[in-house]
Image (tube, coloured by chain):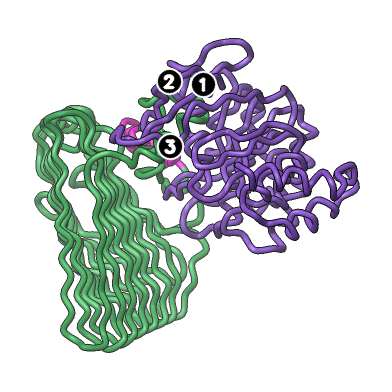
Chain colours: A purple, B green
Amino acid sequence: MEGVTIPTYDLKCEIVNNISFKVREKSIHAIIGPNGSGKSTLAYSIMGLPTYKISKGKIFFDGQDITNLNITERAKLGITLAWQEPARIDGLTVLKYLSLGMKDKSNIIQQAIKALKTVNLDPERYLNRFIDETLSGGERKRIELAATIAMCPRLIVLDEPTAGLDLIVIEDFFNIFNRVKELDMTILLITHREDIGMVSDYATLLWRGDAIITSTFPEVMIRYCAKAGLKEYCKRTIFQGEETACFDEDYIDRIFREEESK
Amino acid sequence: MSNTEYPKEILESLEDYNINIRDFLPGHGKGAKLLLDFNKIKGLEEIDGVILKGKEIKNGIIADIIIKKGVTLEDPIHLCFGVNKETGIQEIFPRIIAEDNSEVTIQAHCSFPKADGLIHKMFGHFYIGNNCKFNYSETHYHGEKSGATVAPVAYMYIGENSIFENNFTLTRGTVGKVKILIDIYAMKDSVIRSTIKAFGRTKNDSVRIRDSIFLEGENARSVLKMKAAAQNGGEVLMYGVTEGNAPKCNGHVECNEIVLGRGSICRARPYIRATDPEASVSHEASLGRFPQKWLDELKAKGLTEEEAIQTLIEAMLGE
């Protein structure tokens, strides 16, 4: 994204303001930030939803300017979105839903079975069910993720994939992310939960519509905590995992001082 | 009776619904069957536990279908009311009785592939006893000329603790003029699920359906779903009626209608009424286009707007 500004639908104010960042191919890139920082807006504008049209800047995908492409054109290039609250549609079976985006229509059932297994759903139980009110929120989210995987896209935008799910299900989602990671897809992970962001290789911090930093996830997390004034929480979180052990307390103190002096 | 004795146009016209009606012909399959070609009975087959009688009258038939007490039928009873002519009047007077503790599925097909000035009327009575599971599905095909006038009326009494499922489908071909009136009376602890689906495709298509459920017994429950689409000037009017007239009864009416293109009209008139302070009835209705979010979700899978709408219509009106 280069200098992207997205106004509200009535153009009265800007939701995200002049933000730029790059997502590396075949990586998991998290967009983190508090509620209302513009994360979902960013997700929808990348997908090309008309109500989230950018007023300034450009979006590039694999070097191609996609700013003026519509949703379908972007999807055909290999971009898709797994929605935070996917719709429940009476009469549409899981199999049909999973097949909609498949490029190869010759072996639909096998592809659908594979996609359901990736998200830990039993194909026998789910293939012929309808994606209606009889599915729980967690089941529906998994099916949404399976539908995006079945497309074999190059970029999946995951909008708050764990929102509204209980802790046991969230634990399962970590395993699912790791499985999806092996499928050689690029994932843009929108989340306000730092524990979910831990699965990512890189991250961008959105704060009140501005992109503050793009770096490795722990580094972005330190900046996030510093912005929010959560020093103890930061230390607890950062020193949890082996990968983040390279950050010592002095470094964290320095970042916090920087933020406080702003 | 061999396959060839029954008009193949009628048999083939239902294949669009993924129904292979040949399986239901006398001599084929295990279920009881009654086949009518215009106003002549072309096939009648009884089985153990089912009494099936038909009598030809001037423009059609009077038929009795009785499922005996305690009988559970593994195979559906098949009723086919076909007319392979452009014009004429077909009148059906069926009386369907399911005695206590019986379980049955009835599949009725009304097919008029050449209709161009044809009139089909039905006046049916259903008496479903206590503790029954009764599934009735009626699938219509009215040809491609909007030339049928179809006016069925059905009164249905559902006994205590019985489960009654009613499915009416008219989603292939044209409609012509359809006026349907269904009244369902639900007794104590009974469960009613009624789903009506219709698609008006041309400016000469007009659908008017009133499906009424009267919850007359304590703890009777119902869900009435009416789903329709109108395109190219077609017109659909759905009256979904539910009355809660007993303690702890609970009913819900849902109307979803989609308008495709200018000149088409969808109307929904959900009507709910409660006369008991412990009754609960509710309704919801949506008309116009599909929610934008649904379309966006499908477009994000690579579908065009038109493909997304088509997918949603097929889902809404599908079998």
Q: Are marks 2 and 3 on the same chain?
A: yes
* Position of B221 relative to B22 (above/below): below
- Residue at far top of view: A64
Would you say B89 lies left or right of B29 here?
left
Can residue B80 be seen? no
Q: Chain of mark 2?
A: A
The residue tagged 1 is A3
The residue tagged 2 is A56
> Which x, y percent locates residue A142?
63, 48
Mark 1, secondary structure of its residue: strand
Can residue B103 be seen? yes
Over which residues does the magenta segment extend?
B2-22
- Residue at far front of view: A261
Name the quarter where the N terminus of chain A is drawn.
top right
Precedes in sequence: disc 2 or disc 3: 3
Q: Is residue A84 magenta?
A: no
- Dot 2 amino acid type: Lys
- Dot 1 amino acid type: Gly
